Image (spheres, helix red, strand yellow):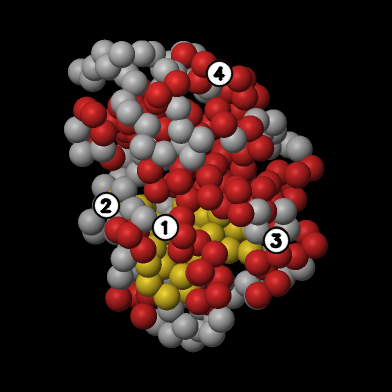
C-alpha cells in the first residue's frame, strides 16, 4: 500500500465526474484519478505555464475553434466541435493547441454541475492536409491519446470526423497505434458535402455555420474564451497544485509508459 501526494484536490464537481464516469466502481475510480494526476505531473509541456493571456494561448484561440455546444442530445450527451479555422500551418502549434484544449477541458470538468451521460467530439478536417503530419509531435500525441481515453473523467459515446478527405487514412494511421480498440469502434468518418453526421447528431444542436440553431461559431467561441480567461488565477495557481509525488510510488509499480497504474487511493471514499 502506498500514497501519492495531491494538493488542493477539493473540486466536488470533478470528484463526482470521476465517480460517475467510472461506473461508480471504486477501483476504477482510484485508477483513473491516479492516472489523471500522474499524466499531468509527467507532462509539464501540457499542464504548466497555462496563462490564457499569454501570446501562445491567444494564438491558439485565433486559429482554432474549440466549441462545447450549448445543448445536449436527447440521451444527455454533450457535443463538442474542434476545427482549424486557418489553413496557414505556420500559425499552428500542436503542443500549444493540446495545452489549450486541456485548459478548456479543465474549465468544464471543474465548473459544470450538470454532468452529461456521455461526450460526442466532432473533428472538422476541412482545413487539414497531408502537410499537417509535419506539425504533429508524436510524444505529445501519445500523451493526449492516453489522457483523453483513460484518465479524463468522461464517457466517449461517439467520435465523428467530418469533411474527411480521401487521404484521411494516412492521418488516421498516426493515431491508430495509440487508440484503444473500443474507442476505434466509435469513430465514424464523413465525406465532404454529406449529411450522414445527422444520423447520429441532430443538426439543430450544431452552430449556424453547420446548418444548426446553436448560435454562431464566434458567439460560442467567445463565451468559452471568456470562461477560460475568468479562470486565469486558478490556472496559474494549479501549475503546481495538481501534481503527484512520483518518488512515493514503489519501484515495482513505476511504469515509464504511464500505463496500467494500480489504484493508489486505498482510503478514498464518496458520500
3 or 2: tag closer to the N-terminus: 2
- CB under 8 Å between discs 3 and 2: no
Residue located 22% across and 28% down the image: 26
Q: Is residue 232 left or right of residue 152?
A: right
To which quarter of the image does residue 249 belong? top left
Place of residue 87 in the rendered image (x, y in percent of width and height, measured from the top left): 72, 70
Does residue 169 lie above or below 219 as drawn? Answer: below
- Relative placement, left or right, of 36 versus 44 is left
Q: Of callouts 1 and 3, which one flags the residue occurring earlier in the amino acid sequence? A: 3
Occupied quadrant, residue 100? top right
Comparing labels 2 and 4, the label whose residue is closer to the camera? 4
Residue beneath disc 4:
241
Distance CA(mark 4)–CA(mark 3):
31 Å
C-alpha separation, residue under disc 3 versus residue under disc 2? 35 Å
Q: Nearer the viewer, mark 1 or mark 3?
A: 1
Q: Which residue is mark 3?
A: 135
Task: State whether residue 114 is above or below residue 199.
Answer: above
User: Where does label 1 land, which residue?
Assistant: 179
Q: Earlier in the sequence, mark 4 or mark 1?
A: 1
Residue carrying label 2: 76
Amino acid at each position: 500500500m502506498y500514497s501519492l501526494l495531491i494538493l488542493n484536490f477539493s473540486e466536488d464537481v470533478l470528484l463526482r465526474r470521476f465517480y460517475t464516469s467510472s461506473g461508480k466502481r471504486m477501483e476504477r475510480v482510484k485508477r483513473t484519478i491516479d492516472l489523471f494526476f500522474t499524466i499531468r505531473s509527467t507532462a509539464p509541456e501540457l499542464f504548466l505555464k497555462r496563462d490564457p493571456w499569454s501570446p501562445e494561448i491567444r494564438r491558439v484561440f485565433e486559429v482554432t475553434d474549440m466549441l462545447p455546444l450549448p445543448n445536449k442530445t436527447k440521451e444527455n450527451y454533450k457535443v463538442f466541435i474542434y476545427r482549424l479555422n486557418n489553413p496557414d500551418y505556420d500559425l499552428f502549434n500542436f503542443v500549444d493547441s493540446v495545452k489549450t484544449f486541456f485548459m478548456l477541458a479543465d474549465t468544464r470538468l471543474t465548473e459544470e454541475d450538470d454532468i452529461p451521460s456521455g461526450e460526442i467530439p466532432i473533428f472538422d478536417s476541412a482545413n487539414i492536409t497531408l502537410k499537417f503530419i509535419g506539425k504533429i509531435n508524436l510524444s505529445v500525441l501519445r500523451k493526449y491519446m492516453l489522457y483523453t481515453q483513460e484518465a479524463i473523467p468522461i464517457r466517449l459515446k461517439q467520435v465523428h470526423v467530418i469533411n474527411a478527405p480521401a487521404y484521411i487514412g494516412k492521418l488516421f494511421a498516426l493515431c491508430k497505434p495509440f487508440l484503444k480498440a473500443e474507442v476505434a469502434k466509435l469513430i465514424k468518418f464523413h465525406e465532404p458535402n454529406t449529411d450522414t453526421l445527422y444520423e447520429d447528431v441532430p443538426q439543430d444542436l450544431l452552430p449556424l455555420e453547420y446548418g444548426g440553431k446553436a448560435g454562431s461559431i464566434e458567439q460560442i467561441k467567445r463565451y468559452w474564451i471568456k470562461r477560460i480567461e475568468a479562470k486565469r488565477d486558478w490556472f496559474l495557481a494549479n501549475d503546481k497544485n495538481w501534481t503527484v509525488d512520483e518518488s512515493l510510488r514503489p519501484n515495482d509499480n513505476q511504469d515509464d509508459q504511464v500505463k496500467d497504474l494500480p489504484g493508489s487511493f486505498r482510503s478514498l471514499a464518496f458520500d
